[in-house]
Image (cartoon, rainbow, N blue to C red):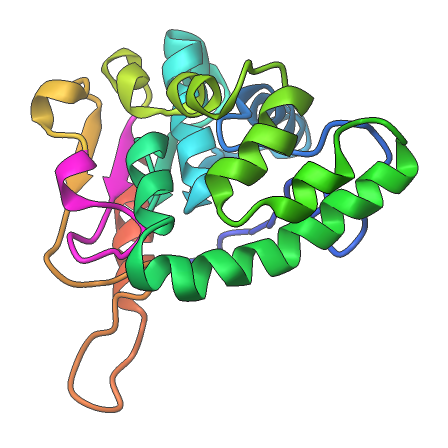
Amino acid sequence: MRGWACAVPHFRGCSGELNHAPRAYHSGDFEEIDWILRRFQRGHAGPVFAVGISLGGNALMRWAGEFGNAATGVVRAVASVCSPLDLAASGHAIGQGFNRLVYTRMFLNSMVPKALKKLEQHPGLFSAEALRAARDLYAFDNVVTAPLHGFRNTEDYWARASAKPHMRRIVVPALALNALNDPFVPAASLPQAVDVSAAVTLWQPRQGGHVGFPSAPFPGHVRAMPEAVCGFFAAQL
């Protein structure tokens, strides 16, 4: 409706095709975000906006904090939607109760086969036995994600990849949108005004779940979130 061109990049291995390198992706992969955004910038004459959903939003905010003033030369504004900006808090939340029974199992059913295919590409990359024994994301990250991407272990990965500790360094206009009832992102872990720079707008509605934000009476619609994000971007023009 606004006449904006859109592109949807995928992290390595998430497009339906396994990448060939030993590395895959991780939730603080700001170097990969930088490569993607600069490539868009080179091929587009107008302003560039970037929005990251869930883990992608953490990586995007991690990039904005890491690059500081330099980010303003690449994008006009950024937004994260339902992103686990404190990876340790969200990682532990996903590993407990209903989340563990349903969502952890769903994630591992997708991630473990991909990791085993990666092991076929690069034998000896990690332990297949340890991978098959993983029953939560903590264990998976300890076996696969952390060592593949230069982290000592899961704790080191979650701490260094989280965007929240870096959000005071964000200079480019940024919107961090998180519902307070998101089952993956504990409300107590969300950044507050003291945790972010003046460039960051925090929007934390009571309802919305994880990337849902249903609105209006039944049957309702899910336009509220994209309209809010696009409205934030439009205000930066």
Rendered-image quadrant of the N terminus: bottom left
Q: Is residue 101 rendered to the left or right of residue 198?
A: right
Q: Does the magenta stretch include residue 144?
A: no
Q: Is residue 59 rendered to the left or right of residue 163?
A: right
The boundaries of the magenta stretch are 173-190
**Residue 128 percent location from the top left of the image:** 76, 39
Task: Give whichever of 219, 146 is nearer the camera.
Answer: 146
**Residue 93 percent location from the top left of the image:** 30, 46
Residue 225 vertical placement versus 19 (above, below): below
Residue at the image point whose x is 83% and y is 38% from the top: 119
**Residue 131 percent location from the top left of the image:** 67, 41
Residue 100 vertical placement versus 89 (above, below): below
Q: Count every numbered label the image shows and give the total.
A: 0
Q: In which quarter of the image is residue 12?
A: top right
Task: Give whichever of 237, 112 is nearer the camera.
Answer: 112
Q: Is residue 188 magenta?
A: yes
Residue at the image point whose x is 23% and y is 47% from the top: 178
Residue 146 vertical placement versus 40 (above, below): above
Residue at the image point whose x is 26% and y is 62% from the top: 209
Q: Is residue 1 rendered to the left or right of residue 129?
A: left
Q: Answer whether residue 233 is visible to the viewer in this image.
A: yes
Residue at the image point whose x is 28% and y is 24% from the top: 164
Tell me which secondary structure the magenta stretch mostly adopts: loop
